[in-house]
Structures are given as C-alpha cells and as structure tokens.
Amino acid sequence: MRLIALAAIAAALAGCQTVRTFDRDLMSRFEMTGPDAWTMTVTTAANYPADSEKHEAIRIGWIGDFARANGCAEFEVTDRQLTRAPTDNFMRTGTSDQVGTLRYTGACR
C-alpha cells in the first residue's frame, strides 16, 4: 500500500512539471539574440496576469529553464515591457487590464 501511495505522489509531482513545461512551451518564445544576450516573449492571460507576483516568479523560472538550456549559467533580466491587449475581447481578457504580451530582455552572466 505504501508503494502505491509513493507511486501516486511521484506521478502527481511529474504531472506538475508537465503542466509547467506545457504552459511554458505554449505561452513563451525564447531566443538568443547574441553570444550572451536573449529575449523572451510571453503571452499573458487572465489566469497568468502580468501583475501577479506568483506568475512573475513562474515566468522568471521559464527564463531560467531556457537560459540554462542555451548555455547560460546565470542570467540577468535587463528590461521588462508589457504591451496590453485590447480589452474588447472579454473572453480573453476578462476584467484584467494586465493581459497582453510581456517582453523580457537580458544577458547571460
């Protein structure tokens, strides 16, 4: 019985990682723009608002994932710009004015 419980916990944790990578891959685009420079563009949504500390931490984690995969041991975000989406699509934006596109630029350290 303990083995089944441990297997269920391991599967649940693996599922969380799958959701994280699914969202990252669906919502973001990362590109190296120079030997030590990068840009990441992220689509925000009502459930991933730009002004949420929790979701900003998730996005910074995505930057870390991409930076490490591209040879950056450490990274620094040098700029963050939000371009708001038009609010005429209630299904997409809900009541949030923090929905749109975030553009991060930075450097490897």
Image: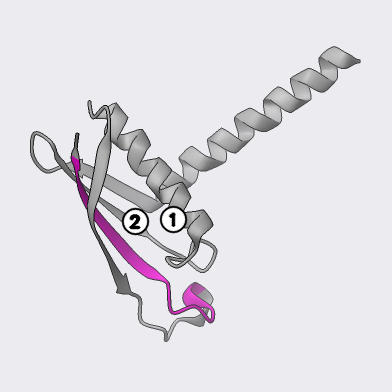
Identify the residue under disc 1: 56
Q: Amino acid at mark 2?
A: Val
Residue 78 is at least partly visible in this image: yes
| Residue 25 seen in the current view | no
The residue carrying mark 2 is 42
Location of residue 17 in the rendering, given as x and y in whole percent from the top left corner: 55, 34
Tell me how the rendering is colored. one colour
The image position of residue 8, as x and y in percent, is 77, 25
Checking the image for residue 26, the label placed there is none
For the residues labelled 1 and 2, the Cα–Cα distance comes to 11 Å
Label 1 CA crowd tier, 10 Å (few <14, some 14–19, many 20+): some
Stretch in magenta = 92-107
Q: Residue at x 87, y 15 (%)?
A: 2
Vertical arrangement, residue 81 with respect to residue 104, above or below? below
Disc with the residue nearer the chain's start (1 vs 2): 2
Foreground tag (1 vs 2): 1
Residue at the right extreme of this rendering = 1
Picture quarter containing residue 14?
top right
- Count neighbours of disc 2 (C-alpha within 10 A) and say few if under 14, some if 14 to 19, many if 20 or more: many
Q: Residue at x 25, y 44 (%)?
A: 76
